[in-house]
Amino acid sequence: MSKLVYRTIISNEKLHAIDEIIRLFFDEICKPDKTKLTFVIHEIIVNALQAYERHKVLSTERIVEIRLDLYLDEVNIEIMDYAGGMQIDKDRMARQSNENQSLETNGRGMLFINHFVDEFTWHTHEEGGIMVRLKKKVQKASDYEYDVI
């Protein structure tokens, strides 16, 4: 079992550093899936940052908690913010996914997330933000065959 728990204050300037931490974690445990999973987490953090900005939360209080667990061949991801919630219509997202329509700028990230993981749920938590839960079956790095050139 591999685990990463990371709590930080988020900002546009810190996004790259957070991406690197996530990428390094996935590089060690599930290299074939690391790009998609890093993208998924990045999108969720960007959404949290936008929600913090919409709600005019002080930059020093823009906290996000990331929990990554690998157990056997499944990665469980939990991301929690305190930004007041997401403004997304689940029915609209499902329709667009089914109809394969091109999307305006809002909603595309959520559509990709839905496509890149096996399970995607979220709910408002009692502290006033969103808890996102994701699951993805992965090929573990130890099972992956590397080509040596």
Image (spheres, rainbow, N blue to C red):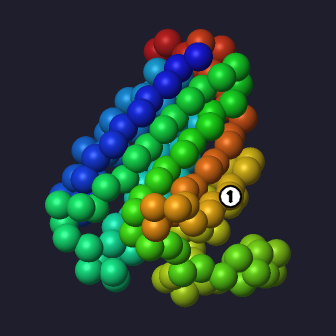
Q: Quadrant of residue 138?
A: top right
Query: Residue beneath label 1, please?
Result: 121
The picture places residue 50, in percent across and down from the top left corner, at 36, 74
Q: Is residue 63 left or right of residue 79?
A: left
Occupied quadrant, residue 4? top left
Question: For this view, does 129 lie left or right of residue 54?
Answer: right
- At 57% from the left and 55% from the top, the residue drawn is 132
63 in relation to 129, above or below: above
- Could you tell me if residue 101 is visible in this image? no
Q: 42 above or below 141?
A: below
Q: Nearer the viewer, residue 136 or 149?
A: 136
The picture places residue 72, in percent across and down from the top left corner, at 70, 20
At x 66% / y 82%, what residue is drawn?
A: 89
Crowd tier of the residue under label 1, counting other residues whose Cα lies within 10 Å: few below 14, some 14–19, many 20 or above: few
Indicate whether 16 appears above or below 98: above
Residue flagged by tag 1: what amino acid is it? Thr
Where residue 147 appears, as percent x and y from the top left, is 55, 16
State the SS at label 1: strand
26 left or right of 17 in image = right
Residue positioned 62% across, 50% down in the render: 133
